[in-house]
Amino acid sequence: MKRFLFYVLSTMAVATATDTSATGSFGLLPDRGDAYLSFYLDNDLFAGTDENYTNGVRISWISGARDPEQFGAVQRGLRRLTGDARSLTLFQRISGFRDLTNIEYNYGTSITQLMFTPEDPDALESPPGESPYAGWLGLGFSLHAKDSFAINSVELSIGTVGPSSQAKEVQDFIHDLKGVDRFKGWDSQIPNEPTLNLFYSQKRRMTFLESEWGNFAVDGFSEWGIGLGTFRTDLYLGALTRFGWNLPVDFSDPRLLPTAYSHQPFKTDRKEIGLWSLYGLFGLRGSAVAHDITLDGPVFSDFDTGATRKPLIGGMYAGFGIRYQDLKFTYVQTYRSRRFKEQNRGREFGSIAVSYRF
């Protein structure tokens, strides 16, 4: 586990300090040049609880526009799924691109940790009807291809569920800092198992929404995506709209999701106006879930989580964003329906995203 953490942390450190020309033949790491460094935090304390999906944290680095000739082995493999002229025919047909010869690319690296606990901190095992103890730690490599109307994102994620995710240690550290009781049932968490996942997502501009009245504007996008792998297998649909003053050209998506993309989502010549932006946002999302390791348990060993995953999940979120020059802060409050049948009700949590453009 220590070796895995060392690899993950060193990868992220190098990503913030290394140029593409020095990354070697694999090209795993993004480089500088109109790039974004972002920090994401999900926590249910924003909704006044400490249970179920209780914490998520992510650090991501997304490059500026890059020439495909700079791609390493990972990016070249992911490119086959982006829908551009070098992609498989199926992905070209569903790409949403208007001109396959005029595509812009960005790629990135991220590290993510997710944490799930029951409501009762003193229970040595998750009580019936409550979330099982689970933690996940993952490293993602993503490629994003876009034109002026659509963006297709592909992410390869490798990770681990169980004690190796270090979820217990992180939660204990935070609770000790806050002076609150530790959760006592982490010994009953889902056991160690490596995970491998491939995520694909597509966003398309909703041009019928786009309007401007001086510096006040409205825009938005529709989205859909699919995940395949041992961590999560699902299909989702959704939409997001923004409204406010001096809307940034990037969306700085505050949701801690695979292929989360704090960058300019569509190719455009539009420039940001002024030093600041202030806007609201609202979105909907529905998912069909075929597998979730945090509820179904490990794939290659027997473990009863006591939870029965619901196949359909819905959610809505609303919040606001602030930009000052190259620094952006976004907050949303999310309501999500029950994740498993024994759960007595849906849950809320808050999400923060802070991103800086270099």
Image (tube, rainbow, N blue to C red):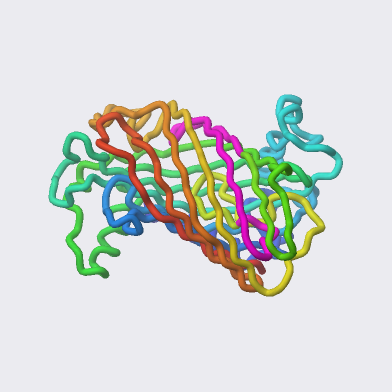
* Residue 341 image offset from top left, x and y in percent: 29, 29
* Residue 99 image offset from top left, x and y in percent: 84, 38
Q: Is residue 303 left or right of residue 16?
A: left
* Residue 293 image offset from top left, x and y in percent: 37, 34
Question: Can you say whether 297 is above or below 10 in the image?
Answer: above
Prevalent SS, magenta region: strand
> Can you tell which quarter of the image residue 345 is in?
top left
Count of picture labels: 0
Q: Which residue lies at the image location 67% right of the left edge and 61% below the top edge?
A: 247
Q: Is residue 168 visible?
A: yes
Question: Can you say whether 290 is above or below 123 in the image?
Answer: above
Q: Is residue 163 left or right of residue 334?
A: left
Is residue 100 located in the magenta-colored stretch of the structure?
no
Closest to the observer: 83 or 326? 326
Closest to the observer: 93 or 221? 221
User: Looking at the rendering, in which quadrant would you find the C terminus?
Assistant: bottom right
Is residue 231 located in the magenta-colored stretch of the structure?
yes
Closest to the observer: 267 or 337? 337
Q: Which residue lies at the image location 34% right of the left edge and 54% below the top edge?
A: 44
Q: Which residue lies at the image location 25% right of the left edge and 31% below the top edge?
A: 342
Magenta region: which residues? 223-251
Q: Which residue lies at the image location 71% right of the left edge and 34% below the top edge?
A: 80
* Residue 79 image offset from top left, x and y in percent: 71, 39
Closest to the observer: 277 or 18? 277
Q: Is residue 10 visible?
A: no
